[in-house]
Amino acid sequence: SALASNDKANAQYKYYKSICIEEGDTLWDIASEYIEGTDIDHNEYIREICELNCIYAEEIHAGDYIIVSYYSDELK
């Protein structure tokens, strides 16, 4: 039904913000936090973070700032 197909894709807006890497953070952990509730693959999200920040996954260090995308059903 039309309702079921619209339910999952209920107007997810994509936003970007800068976050500070904390001691012990991994891109996998960050991906888990920011793609929760979406059907985005962890590896795809991590690739996007690396491309946005011109880094490799193992290049993040506590105190660094990186740009991440996140999703909301609210228009901000």
Image: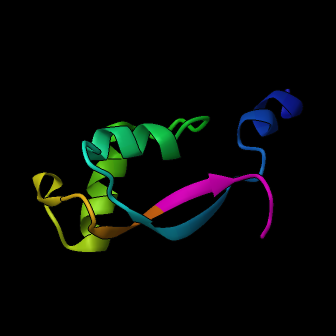
- Residue 75 lies in the magenta-colored region: yes
Query: In which quadrant will I find the C terminus?
Result: bottom right
Q: Tell me which corner region of the image, top left, top right, bottom left or bottom right, holds residue 8.
A: top right
Task: Tell me the colour scheme of the image.
Answer: rainbow
Residue 52: x and y in percent read 32, 71
Above or below, comparing residue 15 to residue 12 in the picture: below
Q: Which portion, as a residue range, is magenta?
A: 69-76
Residue at the location (29% across, 45% down)? Answer: 25
Q: Tell me which corner region of the image, top left, top right, bottom left or bottom right, holds residue 55.
A: bottom left
* Left or right relative to 70: residue 54: left
Return the residue nearer the eye: 24 or 31.
24
* Left or right relative to 30: residue 8: right
Q: Count the labels in the image.
A: 0
Residue 66: x and y in percent read 34, 68
Return the residue nearer the eye: 39 or 29.
29
Residue at the location (27% across, 54% down)? Answer: 47
* Left or right relative to 37: residue 8: right
Residue 5: x and y in percent read 76, 33
Above or below, comparing residue 73 to residue 2 in the picture: below
Residue at the location (27% across, 65% down)? Answer: 63
Residue 6: x and y in percent read 80, 39
Residue at the location (55% across, 36% down)? Answer: 36
Return the residue nearer the eye: 62 or 60.
62
- Residue 30 lies in the magenta-colored region: no
Above or below, comparing residue 71 to residue 41 in the picture: below
Query: In which quadrant will I find the N terminus?
Result: top right
